[in-house]
Amino acid sequence: MRLKRSRTSSITLYKRLALAVPSVLPMILLFLFGLLVYQLFTIRQIKCSLNDTPCPVELLDKINKYLGSNMLFLNQKELTASLKASFPIEKTNLGFQMFNTLAVKVEGRLTSINTQLSLEKTLPVLSFDGREGSTESAIFQKPSEEISHSTQSIEYLNFEIWDNGLMSPAASSDSKIKYLFTTKPDTSAVRSVYSVIKLLEKYLEVDQIWILNARVFLRRSGQPDIIVGVPFDEDSLVQALQSLAYLTTIKKDAKVIDLRFKNPIIR
């Protein structure tokens, strides 16, 4: 009798397992399929192009943090916003290629100005500032000479500045444009700096440009320094620049031509 019960019990267990396997097997297969799909869409490599050329390092640094994440759960709006925050991007296309590759195609501006920046507690003190009301040039030095001497030990960071006021890190090691400020400029100030530099370079051959907060100092070989303020009135500045050849003849020993005002001041 006991043997019969044992045999019956074994048969019953076998039937239960036989019934359970068909219902569990699809779940196992579905789990394995999901795992395979997840692995297939995991980002292992990134291809990035800016206007059909390889992306600069400032963009790659933003994108590479998505390595190891899954394309199925990628927040495309977040990625696009991150790129736009570091680069003047107009259009971004994201795609996924076989073999776990994220393809990023970016279209953006290419006209920037390479600039060296430095955030300073204080800016150079100029003898020119202590003689604001005097036209006697013998009592002050050329601002460009004082600025050049007093900023020799400054360590600069290399940036590109763009027409929309964005500043992005750059790999360049030197620039004739030095931008010093005591507080980080907002986009409006950077836009003004960008515009005035483009305008000045259109009319002048410039050896060196220093921006000290809201003042732009230009050094030209054998010529008086030029000072421009930002923001600026474009019409007045253009007229002054077009008359510069005449202005330099008014005072032969002039060290500075100050174009921050409607009527240029020659000192």
Image: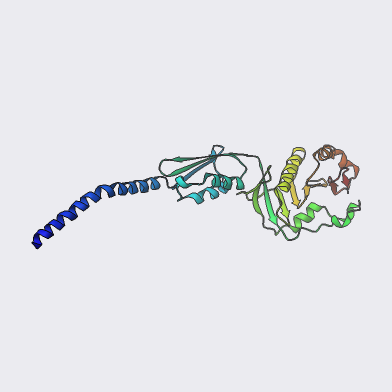
Which quarter of the rendered picture does the N terminus lie within?
bottom left
The residue lying toward the viewer, choosing from 233 and 37, is: 37
Quarter of the image for residue 183 reads bottom right
Q: Position of residue 10 (x, y in %)?
A: 15, 57
Q: Is residue 249 above or below residue 18?
A: above
Report the side of 162 relative to 24 (left or right). right
Report the side of 185 relative to 65 (left or right). right
Colour scheme of the picture: rainbow
Q: Position of residue 118 (x, y in %)?
A: 69, 55
Q: Examine the rendering and report whether any part of residue 262 can be seen.
A: yes
Q: Is residue 28 above or below residue 110?
A: below
Q: Position of residue 79 (x, y in %)?
A: 54, 46
Report the side of 263 relative to 53 (left or right). right
Residue at image point 68% right, 48% down: 115
Q: Examine the rendering and report whether any part of residue 205 can be seen.
A: no
Question: How many discs appear?
Answer: 0
Report the side of 89 relative to 1 (left or right). right
The residue lying toward the viewer, choosing from 168 and 113, is: 168
Residue at image point 74% right, 43% down: 197
Residue at image point 44% right, 43% down: 101
Of all residues, the one furthest to the front in this rendering is: 1
Q: Position of residue 22 (x, y in %)?
A: 25, 47
The residue lying toward the viewer, choosing from 227 and 29, is: 29
